[in-house]
Amino acid sequence: MEEKKHTSSHYEKELQEIKNGLIYLGALTEKAIQAAMKSLSERNADIARKVIKDDNEIDRLDTDLEERCIKILALRQPTAIDLRFITTAIKITGHLERIGDMAVNIAEKAILLIEEPQLKPYIDLPRMTDLVAEMIKNSLDSFIRNDLRMAEKVRQTEQVVDDLNEQIFRELLTFMMEDSKSIHRALLIMQVSKNLERIADHAKGIADMVTYMVTGECVRHQTCPLDEKEPA
Amino acid sequence: MDSNTIIQLSHVNFYYGQSRALTDISMSFRKNKVTALIGPSGCGKSTLLRLLNRMNDLIDGTSVEGEILFEDKNIYAPDIDPVEIRRKIGMVFQKPNPFPKTIYNNIAYGPKLTSINTGDLDTLVEQSLKQAVLWDEVKDLLNKSAMNLSGGQQQRLCIARALAMKPDILLMDEPTSALDPISTAKIEELIEELKKNYTIIIVTHNMQQAARISDETAFFYMGNLVEYNKTEEIFTKPDMKHTEDYITGRFG
Protein backbone atom coordinates (compact mmCIF):
# COMPACT_ATOMS: atom_id res chain seq x y z
CA MET A 1 0.00 0.00 0.00
CA GLU A 2 1.28 3.45 -0.90
CA GLU A 3 2.19 5.38 2.25
CA LYS A 4 0.25 8.62 2.66
CA LYS A 5 2.30 11.79 2.87
CA HIS A 6 2.61 13.78 6.09
CA THR A 7 0.55 16.91 6.45
CA SER A 8 3.84 18.71 7.14
CA SER A 9 5.80 18.75 3.89
CA HIS A 10 8.97 19.77 5.79
CA TYR A 11 8.74 16.67 7.94
CA GLU A 12 8.13 14.55 4.84
CA LYS A 13 11.22 16.08 3.25
CA GLU A 14 13.36 15.43 6.34
CA LEU A 15 12.39 11.75 6.35
CA GLN A 16 13.03 11.46 2.61
CA GLU A 17 16.48 13.02 3.07
CA ILE A 18 17.33 10.36 5.63
CA LYS A 19 16.24 7.64 3.20
CA ASN A 20 18.34 9.17 0.42
CA GLY A 21 21.31 9.55 2.76
CA LEU A 22 21.16 5.89 3.74
CA ILE A 23 20.96 4.76 0.10
CA TYR A 24 24.02 6.88 -0.70
CA LEU A 25 25.92 5.63 2.35
CA GLY A 26 25.00 2.05 1.39
CA ALA A 27 26.30 2.60 -2.13
CA LEU A 28 29.59 3.97 -0.75
CA THR A 29 30.13 0.98 1.54
CA GLU A 30 29.28 -1.47 -1.25
CA LYS A 31 31.82 0.27 -3.47
CA ALA A 32 34.42 0.20 -0.68
CA ILE A 33 34.11 -3.57 -0.24
CA GLN A 34 34.34 -4.24 -3.96
CA ALA A 35 37.35 -1.93 -4.26
CA ALA A 36 39.11 -3.54 -1.28
CA MET A 37 38.67 -6.96 -2.87
CA LYS A 38 39.79 -5.62 -6.26
CA SER A 39 42.97 -4.29 -4.70
CA LEU A 40 43.66 -7.77 -3.34
CA SER A 41 42.85 -9.74 -6.50
CA GLU A 42 44.60 -7.26 -8.83
CA ARG A 43 47.44 -6.75 -6.32
CA ASN A 44 47.07 -3.00 -6.56
CA ALA A 45 47.92 -1.19 -3.30
CA ASP A 46 46.82 2.19 -4.64
CA ILE A 47 43.21 1.01 -4.76
CA ALA A 48 43.52 -0.23 -1.16
CA ARG A 49 44.95 3.09 0.02
CA LYS A 50 42.04 4.92 -1.63
CA VAL A 51 39.55 2.68 0.25
CA ILE A 52 41.25 3.62 3.52
CA LYS A 53 41.19 7.33 2.65
CA ASP A 54 37.56 7.29 1.45
CA ASP A 55 36.36 5.83 4.74
CA ASN A 56 36.45 9.36 6.19
CA GLU A 57 33.51 10.24 3.96
CA ILE A 58 31.57 7.18 5.22
CA ASP A 59 32.27 8.23 8.83
CA ARG A 60 31.18 11.79 8.11
CA LEU A 61 27.93 10.66 6.50
CA ASP A 62 27.23 8.31 9.41
CA THR A 63 27.59 11.16 11.91
CA ASP A 64 25.49 13.47 9.75
CA LEU A 65 22.65 10.93 9.37
CA GLU A 66 22.66 10.11 13.06
CA GLU A 67 22.44 13.80 13.93
CA ARG A 68 19.51 14.25 11.54
CA CYS A 69 17.70 11.31 13.13
CA ILE A 70 18.28 12.66 16.65
CA LYS A 71 17.02 16.07 15.54
CA ILE A 72 13.80 14.50 14.24
CA LEU A 73 13.36 12.58 17.51
CA ALA A 74 13.78 15.79 19.49
CA LEU A 75 11.79 18.14 17.31
CA ARG A 76 9.13 15.99 15.62
CA GLN A 77 8.55 13.39 18.34
CA PRO A 78 7.72 10.69 15.82
CA THR A 79 5.29 7.90 16.66
CA ALA A 80 4.31 4.48 15.27
CA ILE A 81 5.79 3.80 11.80
CA ASP A 82 7.77 7.07 11.87
CA LEU A 83 9.30 6.15 15.23
CA ARG A 84 10.17 2.69 13.96
CA PHE A 85 11.60 4.23 10.78
CA ILE A 86 13.87 6.61 12.69
CA THR A 87 15.12 3.99 15.18
CA THR A 88 15.77 1.66 12.23
CA ALA A 89 17.62 4.40 10.34
CA ILE A 90 19.86 5.06 13.36
CA LYS A 91 20.71 1.36 13.57
CA ILE A 92 21.27 1.05 9.81
CA THR A 93 23.69 3.96 9.66
CA GLY A 94 25.66 2.32 12.50
CA HIS A 95 25.77 -0.98 10.61
CA LEU A 96 26.91 0.75 7.40
CA GLU A 97 29.64 2.66 9.21
CA ARG A 98 30.98 -0.60 10.65
CA ILE A 99 30.84 -2.19 7.17
CA GLY A 100 32.98 0.74 5.97
CA ASP A 101 35.50 -0.01 8.74
CA MET A 102 35.61 -3.64 7.64
CA ALA A 103 36.33 -2.64 4.07
CA VAL A 104 39.26 -0.65 5.51
CA ASN A 105 40.42 -3.75 7.41
CA ILE A 106 40.30 -5.76 4.19
CA ALA A 107 42.21 -3.02 2.34
CA GLU A 108 44.90 -2.99 5.08
CA LYS A 109 45.28 -6.76 4.85
CA ALA A 110 45.44 -6.46 1.04
CA ILE A 111 48.38 -4.04 1.27
CA LEU A 112 50.27 -6.57 3.42
CA LEU A 113 49.35 -9.48 1.16
CA ILE A 114 50.42 -7.64 -1.99
CA GLU A 115 53.93 -7.34 -0.56
CA GLU A 116 54.29 -11.14 -0.55
CA PRO A 117 53.88 -13.79 -3.26
CA GLN A 118 50.27 -14.83 -3.72
CA LEU A 119 49.49 -17.92 -1.64
CA LYS A 120 46.64 -19.23 -3.82
CA PRO A 121 44.25 -18.03 -6.48
CA TYR A 122 41.35 -16.13 -4.95
CA ILE A 123 38.13 -17.91 -5.92
CA ASP A 124 35.84 -17.97 -2.88
CA LEU A 125 36.78 -14.53 -1.56
CA PRO A 126 35.50 -12.64 -4.66
CA ARG A 127 32.38 -14.82 -4.50
CA MET A 128 31.88 -13.88 -0.86
CA THR A 129 32.46 -10.24 -1.75
CA ASP A 130 29.76 -10.33 -4.43
CA LEU A 131 27.39 -12.02 -2.00
CA VAL A 132 27.90 -9.49 0.80
CA ALA A 133 27.69 -6.54 -1.61
CA GLU A 134 24.38 -7.94 -2.83
CA MET A 135 23.24 -8.43 0.78
CA ILE A 136 23.91 -4.78 1.55
CA LYS A 137 22.07 -3.69 -1.57
CA ASN A 138 19.11 -5.98 -0.88
CA SER A 139 18.90 -5.04 2.79
CA LEU A 140 18.70 -1.36 1.85
CA ASP A 141 16.20 -2.08 -0.93
CA SER A 142 14.06 -3.95 1.60
CA PHE A 143 14.29 -0.88 3.86
CA ILE A 144 13.21 1.52 1.13
CA ARG A 145 10.37 -0.70 -0.10
CA ASN A 146 9.26 -2.16 3.26
CA ASP A 147 9.92 -5.51 1.62
CA LEU A 148 9.88 -8.36 4.15
CA ARG A 149 10.61 -11.05 1.57
CA MET A 150 13.77 -9.33 0.49
CA ALA A 151 14.80 -8.94 4.14
CA GLU A 152 14.28 -12.69 4.55
CA LYS A 153 16.42 -13.38 1.48
CA VAL A 154 19.25 -11.36 3.09
CA ARG A 155 18.97 -13.46 6.25
CA GLN A 156 19.23 -16.65 4.23
CA THR A 157 22.25 -15.46 2.25
CA GLU A 158 24.07 -14.78 5.50
CA GLN A 159 24.16 -18.53 6.11
CA VAL A 160 25.78 -19.09 2.71
CA VAL A 161 28.48 -16.54 3.56
CA ASP A 162 29.07 -18.25 6.91
CA ASP A 163 29.55 -21.57 5.14
CA LEU A 164 32.00 -20.05 2.68
CA ASN A 165 33.98 -18.53 5.53
CA GLU A 166 34.23 -21.92 7.22
CA GLN A 167 35.33 -23.53 3.96
CA ILE A 168 38.05 -20.91 3.45
CA PHE A 169 39.20 -21.42 7.04
CA ARG A 170 39.54 -25.18 6.56
CA GLU A 171 41.33 -24.75 3.25
CA LEU A 172 43.82 -22.28 4.72
CA LEU A 173 44.40 -24.60 7.65
CA THR A 174 45.71 -27.24 5.25
CA PHE A 175 48.03 -24.64 3.67
CA MET A 176 49.43 -23.79 7.09
CA MET A 177 49.91 -27.42 8.06
CA GLU A 178 51.75 -28.17 4.83
CA ASP A 179 54.04 -25.15 4.87
CA SER A 180 54.78 -23.04 7.94
CA LYS A 181 56.01 -20.19 5.69
CA SER A 182 52.44 -19.75 4.50
CA ILE A 183 51.10 -19.07 8.01
CA HIS A 184 51.42 -15.29 7.88
CA ARG A 185 49.66 -14.98 4.50
CA ALA A 186 47.04 -17.60 5.43
CA LEU A 187 46.23 -15.71 8.63
CA LEU A 188 45.85 -12.46 6.68
CA ILE A 189 43.51 -14.14 4.18
CA MET A 190 41.55 -15.63 7.08
CA GLN A 191 41.09 -12.13 8.47
CA VAL A 192 39.86 -10.91 5.08
CA SER A 193 37.36 -13.77 5.02
CA LYS A 194 36.32 -13.08 8.62
CA ASN A 195 35.73 -9.43 7.78
CA LEU A 196 33.48 -10.41 4.88
CA GLU A 197 31.59 -12.75 7.19
CA ARG A 198 31.14 -9.89 9.68
CA ILE A 199 29.88 -7.63 6.89
CA ALA A 200 27.24 -10.27 6.13
CA ASP A 201 26.26 -10.16 9.83
CA HIS A 202 25.79 -6.40 9.59
CA ALA A 203 23.68 -6.75 6.43
CA LYS A 204 21.55 -9.30 8.28
CA GLY A 205 21.31 -6.81 11.15
CA ILE A 206 19.89 -4.27 8.69
CA ALA A 207 17.39 -6.86 7.39
CA ASP A 208 16.33 -7.67 10.95
CA MET A 209 15.72 -3.98 11.64
CA VAL A 210 13.62 -3.73 8.47
CA THR A 211 11.45 -6.56 9.78
CA TYR A 212 11.08 -4.65 13.04
CA MET A 213 10.25 -1.45 11.18
CA VAL A 214 7.55 -3.08 9.07
CA THR A 215 5.97 -5.44 11.61
CA GLY A 216 6.99 -4.06 15.00
CA GLU A 217 8.37 -7.52 15.89
CA CYS A 218 11.96 -7.87 17.05
CA VAL A 219 13.60 -10.80 15.21
CA ARG A 220 17.22 -9.89 15.93
CA HIS A 221 17.98 -12.71 18.32
CA GLN A 222 15.74 -15.35 16.82
CA THR A 223 17.51 -18.37 15.39
CA CYS A 224 17.42 -18.64 11.64
CA PRO A 225 15.84 -22.00 10.63
CA LEU A 226 18.95 -22.73 8.58
CA ASP A 227 21.13 -22.35 11.69
CA GLU A 228 19.48 -25.35 13.29
CA LYS A 229 21.69 -28.20 12.22
CA GLU A 230 20.49 -31.80 12.28
CA PRO A 231 21.80 -33.62 15.36
CA ALA A 232 24.78 -35.80 14.48
CA MET B 1 -19.16 -6.02 34.11
CA ASP B 2 -15.83 -7.35 35.43
CA SER B 3 -14.29 -5.91 38.57
CA ASN B 4 -11.65 -3.89 36.67
CA THR B 5 -14.27 -2.05 34.64
CA ILE B 6 -15.83 1.14 35.99
CA ILE B 7 -17.92 2.24 33.01
CA GLN B 8 -19.13 0.10 30.18
CA LEU B 9 -20.73 1.35 26.98
CA SER B 10 -22.80 -1.00 24.84
CA HIS B 11 -23.92 -0.03 21.33
CA VAL B 12 -24.19 3.65 22.16
CA ASN B 13 -25.51 6.02 19.50
CA PHE B 14 -25.83 9.72 20.13
CA TYR B 15 -27.71 12.33 18.11
CA TYR B 16 -27.76 16.13 17.97
CA GLY B 17 -31.28 16.43 16.54
CA GLN B 18 -31.25 14.23 13.43
CA SER B 19 -27.51 14.26 13.09
CA ARG B 20 -25.69 11.22 14.48
CA ALA B 21 -22.53 12.19 16.37
CA LEU B 22 -21.57 8.76 17.76
CA THR B 23 -22.16 5.41 16.08
CA ASP B 24 -22.48 2.10 17.86
CA ILE B 25 -19.81 2.67 20.49
CA SER B 26 -19.03 -0.30 22.73
CA MET B 27 -16.10 0.04 25.09
CA SER B 28 -15.09 -0.35 28.74
CA PHE B 29 -13.11 2.06 30.88
CA ARG B 30 -10.82 0.48 33.44
CA LYS B 31 -10.70 1.48 37.11
CA ASN B 32 -7.75 3.56 38.32
CA LYS B 33 -6.40 4.00 34.84
CA VAL B 34 -5.96 7.05 32.67
CA THR B 35 -7.74 6.66 29.34
CA ALA B 36 -7.12 9.19 26.59
CA LEU B 37 -9.68 9.91 23.88
CA ILE B 38 -8.03 11.21 20.72
CA GLY B 39 -9.15 12.09 17.21
CA PRO B 40 -9.60 15.07 14.90
CA SER B 41 -12.03 17.89 15.69
CA GLY B 42 -15.62 16.77 15.32
CA CYS B 43 -14.84 13.06 15.74
CA GLY B 44 -17.12 12.75 18.77
CA LYS B 45 -14.57 12.39 21.55
CA SER B 46 -15.82 15.35 23.62
CA THR B 47 -19.41 14.29 22.97
CA LEU B 48 -18.56 10.86 24.34
CA LEU B 49 -16.87 12.39 27.38
CA ARG B 50 -19.94 14.51 28.14
CA LEU B 51 -22.19 11.47 27.72
CA LEU B 52 -20.44 9.81 30.62
CA ASN B 53 -21.82 12.24 33.20
CA ARG B 54 -24.93 13.28 31.33
CA MET B 55 -23.67 16.75 30.50
CA ASN B 56 -25.24 16.41 27.05
CA ASP B 57 -28.66 16.40 28.77
CA LEU B 58 -28.21 20.15 29.06
CA ILE B 59 -28.22 20.53 25.26
CA ASP B 60 -31.67 20.66 23.66
CA GLY B 61 -32.60 18.12 21.02
CA THR B 62 -30.03 15.48 21.90
CA SER B 63 -30.83 11.80 22.27
CA VAL B 64 -28.97 8.68 23.35
CA GLU B 65 -29.42 5.04 22.39
CA GLY B 66 -27.70 2.05 23.94
CA GLU B 67 -26.50 1.52 27.46
CA ILE B 68 -23.87 3.14 29.66
CA LEU B 69 -23.32 1.08 32.79
CA PHE B 70 -21.81 2.64 35.90
CA GLU B 71 -22.02 0.74 39.19
CA ASP B 72 -24.02 -1.88 37.28
CA LYS B 73 -26.78 0.61 36.42
CA ASN B 74 -27.55 2.32 33.15
CA ILE B 75 -26.89 6.00 33.88
CA TYR B 76 -29.59 6.91 31.36
CA ALA B 77 -32.28 4.85 33.13
CA PRO B 78 -35.31 7.00 34.10
CA ASP B 79 -34.81 6.52 37.85
CA ILE B 80 -31.23 7.82 37.81
CA ASP B 81 -30.60 11.34 39.12
CA PRO B 82 -28.18 13.12 36.74
CA VAL B 83 -27.00 15.41 39.55
CA GLU B 84 -25.92 12.41 41.57
CA ILE B 85 -24.14 11.00 38.48
CA ARG B 86 -22.28 14.29 38.05
CA ARG B 87 -21.21 14.19 41.69
CA LYS B 88 -19.70 10.74 41.23
CA ILE B 89 -18.31 11.53 37.81
CA GLY B 90 -16.69 14.96 38.04
CA MET B 91 -15.52 17.10 35.17
CA VAL B 92 -12.71 19.56 34.44
CA PHE B 93 -12.97 21.75 31.36
CA GLN B 94 -10.63 23.22 28.80
CA LYS B 95 -10.51 26.70 30.31
CA PRO B 96 -10.17 27.02 34.07
CA ASN B 97 -13.54 28.23 35.35
CA PRO B 98 -13.27 29.05 39.06
CA PHE B 99 -16.27 30.68 40.73
CA PRO B 100 -15.82 34.40 41.44
CA LYS B 101 -15.45 33.52 45.11
CA THR B 102 -12.66 32.93 47.57
CA ILE B 103 -10.38 29.95 47.09
CA TYR B 104 -11.93 28.37 50.19
CA ASN B 105 -15.47 28.81 48.93
CA ASN B 106 -14.63 27.47 45.50
CA ILE B 107 -13.90 24.15 47.17
CA ALA B 108 -16.57 24.29 49.88
CA TYR B 109 -19.43 25.46 47.64
CA GLY B 110 -20.33 22.08 46.08
CA PRO B 111 -20.22 20.01 49.26
CA LYS B 112 -22.27 22.68 51.14
CA LEU B 113 -24.85 22.86 48.36
CA THR B 114 -25.34 19.14 47.98
CA SER B 115 -25.10 18.66 51.77
CA ILE B 116 -23.22 15.41 51.27
CA ASN B 117 -21.65 14.04 54.38
CA THR B 118 -18.10 15.27 54.02
CA GLY B 119 -17.21 15.75 57.68
CA ASP B 120 -15.29 18.87 58.66
CA LEU B 121 -15.36 21.40 55.80
CA ASP B 122 -11.94 22.92 56.66
CA THR B 123 -10.39 19.48 56.50
CA LEU B 124 -12.10 18.75 53.20
CA VAL B 125 -10.81 22.02 51.68
CA GLU B 126 -7.27 21.29 52.86
CA GLN B 127 -7.43 17.68 51.69
CA SER B 128 -8.75 18.57 48.25
CA LEU B 129 -6.18 21.31 47.73
CA LYS B 130 -3.42 18.95 48.84
CA GLN B 131 -4.63 16.29 46.42
CA ALA B 132 -4.53 18.84 43.64
CA VAL B 133 -0.99 19.85 44.74
CA LEU B 134 -2.09 23.43 45.30
CA TRP B 135 -2.17 23.62 49.10
CA ASP B 136 1.38 24.87 49.59
CA GLU B 137 0.82 27.68 47.11
CA VAL B 138 -2.53 28.91 48.47
CA LYS B 139 -2.74 27.92 52.15
CA ASP B 140 -2.23 31.55 53.24
CA LEU B 141 -4.59 32.91 50.59
CA LEU B 142 -7.71 30.87 51.26
CA ASN B 143 -9.83 33.95 51.76
CA LYS B 144 -8.54 35.69 48.65
CA SER B 145 -10.41 35.58 45.36
CA ALA B 146 -9.69 32.57 43.16
CA MET B 147 -9.68 34.93 40.20
CA ASN B 148 -6.25 36.22 41.30
CA LEU B 149 -4.60 32.85 40.76
CA SER B 150 -2.59 32.06 37.62
CA GLY B 151 -4.19 29.97 34.87
CA GLY B 152 -2.36 26.82 35.97
CA GLN B 153 -3.32 27.38 39.61
CA GLN B 154 -6.94 28.04 38.62
CA GLN B 155 -7.05 24.74 36.71
CA ARG B 156 -5.65 22.86 39.71
CA LEU B 157 -8.25 24.65 41.85
CA CYS B 158 -10.95 23.35 39.48
CA ILE B 159 -9.51 19.85 39.90
CA ALA B 160 -9.52 20.32 43.70
CA ARG B 161 -13.13 21.52 43.47
CA ALA B 162 -14.09 18.38 41.55
CA LEU B 163 -12.22 16.19 44.05
CA ALA B 164 -14.06 17.77 47.00
CA MET B 165 -17.21 16.08 45.74
CA LYS B 166 -15.51 12.71 46.32
CA PRO B 167 -16.04 11.43 42.79
CA ASP B 168 -15.05 8.02 41.44
CA ILE B 169 -14.20 9.27 37.99
CA LEU B 170 -12.72 12.53 36.71
CA LEU B 171 -13.50 13.55 33.15
CA MET B 172 -11.07 16.05 31.68
CA ASP B 173 -11.78 17.89 28.45
CA GLU B 174 -8.46 19.22 27.16
CA PRO B 175 -7.50 20.38 30.65
CA THR B 176 -4.12 21.83 29.67
CA SER B 177 -4.81 23.33 26.26
CA ALA B 178 -5.01 26.84 27.73
CA LEU B 179 -1.94 26.43 29.95
CA ASP B 180 1.79 27.09 29.58
CA PRO B 181 4.27 24.16 29.53
CA ILE B 182 5.15 24.37 33.24
CA SER B 183 1.50 24.42 34.34
CA THR B 184 0.82 21.61 31.87
CA ALA B 185 3.62 19.53 33.38
CA LYS B 186 2.17 20.12 36.86
CA ILE B 187 -1.29 18.97 35.77
CA GLU B 188 0.19 15.92 34.06
CA GLU B 189 2.15 15.10 37.21
CA LEU B 190 -1.06 15.51 39.19
CA ILE B 191 -2.96 13.15 36.87
CA GLU B 192 -0.28 10.49 37.52
CA GLU B 193 -0.86 10.91 41.26
CA LEU B 194 -4.65 11.02 41.05
CA LYS B 195 -5.01 7.76 39.18
CA LYS B 196 -4.08 5.89 42.36
CA ASN B 197 -7.47 6.87 43.75
CA TYR B 198 -9.54 7.89 40.74
CA THR B 199 -10.30 6.80 37.23
CA ILE B 200 -9.42 9.50 34.73
CA ILE B 201 -10.78 9.89 31.22
CA ILE B 202 -9.18 12.68 29.26
CA VAL B 203 -9.80 14.25 25.88
CA THR B 204 -6.66 15.75 24.40
CA HIS B 205 -5.50 17.07 21.05
CA ASN B 206 -1.93 16.80 22.20
CA MET B 207 -0.69 13.41 20.98
CA GLN B 208 2.42 13.53 23.14
CA GLN B 209 0.32 14.28 26.18
CA ALA B 210 -1.84 11.23 25.49
CA ALA B 211 1.33 9.18 25.05
CA ARG B 212 2.89 10.54 28.26
CA ILE B 213 0.05 10.26 30.70
CA SER B 214 -2.46 7.65 29.60
CA ASP B 215 -2.54 3.89 30.10
CA GLU B 216 -5.03 3.32 27.33
CA THR B 217 -5.95 5.31 24.27
CA ALA B 218 -9.06 5.32 22.11
CA PHE B 219 -8.96 6.81 18.62
CA PHE B 220 -12.22 8.18 17.23
CA TYR B 221 -13.03 9.24 13.70
CA MET B 222 -16.34 10.60 12.42
CA GLY B 223 -18.27 9.28 15.39
CA ASN B 224 -16.75 5.79 15.25
CA LEU B 225 -14.35 4.15 17.65
CA VAL B 226 -11.56 3.12 15.28
CA GLU B 227 -9.06 1.62 17.72
CA TYR B 228 -8.84 1.20 21.48
CA ASN B 229 -5.73 -0.32 22.98
CA LYS B 230 -2.86 0.14 25.42
CA THR B 231 -1.28 3.53 24.80
CA GLU B 232 2.13 1.96 24.22
CA GLU B 233 0.68 -0.17 21.41
CA ILE B 234 -1.20 2.72 19.85
CA PHE B 235 1.90 4.91 19.69
CA THR B 236 4.42 2.29 18.62
CA LYS B 237 2.46 -0.25 16.60
CA PRO B 238 -1.20 0.59 16.07
CA ASP B 239 -3.31 -2.13 14.47
CA MET B 240 -5.26 0.16 12.19
CA LYS B 241 -3.72 2.12 9.33
CA HIS B 242 -6.20 4.90 10.02
CA THR B 243 -4.88 5.32 13.58
CA GLU B 244 -1.31 5.32 12.33
CA ASP B 245 -2.05 7.99 9.72
CA TYR B 246 -3.61 10.19 12.38
CA ILE B 247 -0.96 9.92 15.08
CA THR B 248 1.90 10.30 12.61
CA GLY B 249 0.36 13.41 11.11
CA ARG B 250 -0.66 11.95 7.72
CA PHE B 251 -4.11 13.39 7.83
CA GLY B 252 -6.44 15.70 6.04
Image (cartoon, grey):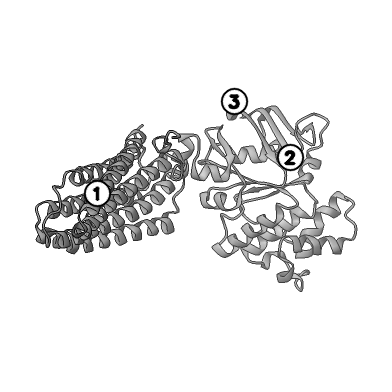
The residue wearing badge 1 is A174
Q: Which badge, 3 or 2, is on the more N-terminal residue? A: 2
Quarter occupied by the N terminus of chain A: top left
Q: CA distance from mark 3 to mark 2?
A: 35 Å
Q: CA distance from mark 1 to mark 2?
A: 69 Å
Image location (x, y in percent) of residue B139 = 76, 71
Q: Which structural element holds mark 2?
A: loop
> Dot 3: few (<14), some (14–19), or many (≥20) neighbours within 10 Å?
few
Which chain's residue wears label 1? Answer: A
> Dot 2: few (<14), some (14–19), or many (≥20) neighbours within 10 Å?
few
Image location (x, y in percent) of residue A101 = 27, 59
Give the amino acid type for the residue marked by disc 1 in the picture: Thr
Number of numbered callouts drawn: 3
Which chain's residue wears label 3? Answer: B
Give the amino acid type for the residue marked by disc 3 in the picture: Gln
Determine which quarter of the picture holds residue B130: bottom right
Which chain's residue wears label 2? Answer: B
The mark lying in front, picked from 3 and 2, is: 2
The residue wearing badge 2 is B4
Residue most extreme to the bottom: B140
Dots 3 and 1 on the same chain: no
The residue wearing badge 3 is B18
Q: Inspect this view and state whether residue B150 appears.
A: yes
Q: Residue at x 32, y 54 (%)?
A: A93
